[in-house]
Amino acid sequence: MSPDEKLVYMANQIAAFFAPQGKERAVKGIADHLNSNWTPHMRARFLAIAPEHKATMNPDVSEALPRVKVPRH
């Protein structure tokens, strides 16, 4: 598994954790988790690769992307 695939895999695991809470809370929870627990580098890379990994990304992760904070350099 490539590092980029690993980021998608981890995001999908986060989505699976939040899924029982319902779509709205899951999307918010995914974004909050990524913003709070992923390093700026991880978030920047994930946002950069997300468009090419949509097919393997949980739909709730895709919906959470606009809420993920873009790291400032």
Image (tube, rainbow, N blue to C red):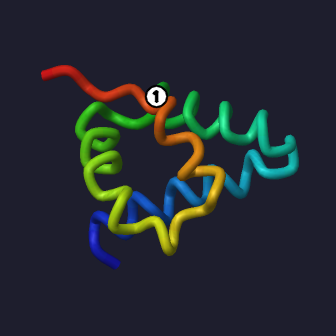
- The quadrant in which residue 3 appears is bottom left
Q: Residue at x 39, y 65 (%)?
A: 6
Nearer to us in this view, 8 or 49: 49
- The quadrant in which residue 49 appears is bottom left
Q: In the image as oriented, which residue stretches furthest toward the left?
A: 73
Q: Quadrant of the N terminus?
A: bottom left
Residue 58 placement (x, y as % from top left): 61, 62
SS label for mark 1: helix
Q: Quadrant of the C terminus?
A: top left
Nearer to us in this view, 17 or 60: 60
Residue 18 placement (x, y as % from top left): 75, 45
Q: Amino acid at mark 1?
A: Asn
Q: Dot 1: few (<14), some (14–19), or many (≥20) neighbours within 10 Å?
A: some
Q: Residue at x 40, y 37 (%)?
A: 38
Q: Residue at x 46, y 66 (%)?
A: 54
Residue 36 placement (x, y as % from top left): 48, 26
Nearer to us in this view, 24 or 41: 24
Lateral position of residue 42 relative to residue 27, left or right = left
- The quadrant in which residue 33 appears is top right
Q: How many marks?
A: 1
Residue to which mark 1 is pinned: 35
Lateral position of residue 66 relative to residue 51, left or right = right
Q: Residue at x 58, y 60 (%)?
A: 12
